[in-house]
Image: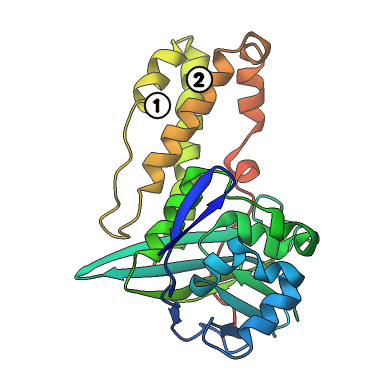
Amino acid sequence: MKTIAFGAIICSIAMAAPSAKSNQSPLPWLKIITAEDPQFQGKLQSIFGQSANSPLVKAVAPFGIVLTHAGSKNLQGISMVWTLNTGAKSIKHKMFYNLMNDPSAVLMHPGESLFFCPLRSVNFLSKSSKAQATAGETVLANSADAAVLNRFLAADSVTVDVDLIVASDGTSAGPDKGKLLKTTVQDKAAYADMRSECLEYLAQGKPVLDWLKPIAAKHGRIDPETGFPDHYLSTQIAVANRWIALLSNPQTKNDFAYVLGLQTPDQVFPFTIKGGLQ
């Protein structure tokens, strides 16, 4: 083991980190290149330039993959699931890389190659036009990224799956083991239910904060079907905390009911995922 400091965050780096194995791509035109592929380093160099050799990129590279888009549709999101095996224990790590909050934005264009890994900071650099200039200077900005990296470094073996591919028109393809379609439906339903009840409270003059505070104080739980956090509950907790902050602020309190009336579920969640991508 050796220790590398990324800013204020210190990680123990295994001298021979286990390279992630990958299952087959859900679509023939989306090529997966793992760290064991002879093309991998060349692809990293084209994405990050000389910063492909920076400590941060080198540390996380064994657990990432390069995706090359040889299809015809712009892609809006890609869901990935890593399986970390340590002894008899198996842990899932899920991430959905997307630009769904901005329907006009594009995650991947046809012909483009991007690097995807468990660290959001490095994935941002993969997509950023300034990646080559900044990747070498980037630090792990929070302890969460450092914890993720250390968890991967401690694994005996790692497998990564491209779980769901979402095009800009909302069509999708993939096994969806992470139940992304279910969680996006849960997110929208949770907000819709919260908004409907909140508007009713406001119309009747009931104390909204008294209703919101117990919801905000709830703890998340694991969805037994997906094995991941229950998105319906976590969305309600997040919404409750956001609305409590707005109602507690004298500058936003008076306009809260008006703004909430404008923020319909379709406006807050404008992107709908469906099947049919080929």
Mark 1 = which residue? Answer: 216
Q: Element type at marker 2? A: helix
Residue 211 visible to the viewer: yes
Near-viewer residue (127 or 178): 127
Q: Considering depth in this image, is 80 or 145 the residue closer to the camera? A: 145
The reply to whether the C-beta atoms of the residues labelled 1 and 2 are less than 8 Å apart is yes
Taking the spot 48% from the left edge, 24% from the top edge, the residue there is 198
What amino acid is at disc 2?
Ile
The residue carrying pointer 2 sits among few (fewer than 14), some (14 to 19) or many (20 or more) residues within 10 Å by Cα, namely some
Tell me, for residue 94, which label it has, or none. Answer: none
Q: CA distance from mark 1 to mark 2?
A: 8 Å
Q: Quadrant of residue 277?
A: bottom right
Residue occupying the point 44% across, 84% down: 23
Closest to the observer, 205 or 26: 26
How many C-alpha atoms fall within 10 Å of the one at disc 1: few (<14), some, or many (≥20)? some
- Amino acid under disc 1: Ala
Residue at (47% x, 86% y) in the render:
24
Does residue 179 appear in this view?
no
Residue depicted at 30% across the width and 58% down the height: 227
Percent x, y for residue 278? 59, 83
Q: Please determine whether, in this image, residue 88 is positioned above or below residue 3.
A: below
Which quadrant would the N terminus be assigned to in this image?
bottom left
Residue that numbered label 2 is attached to: 244
Q: Earlier in the sequence, mark 1 or mark 2?
A: 1
Q: Secondary structure at mark 1?
A: helix
Residue 36 locus on image (x, y percent) = 51, 86
Q: Would you identify the image quadrant in which residue 256 lies? A: top right
Left or right position of 82 against 7 = left
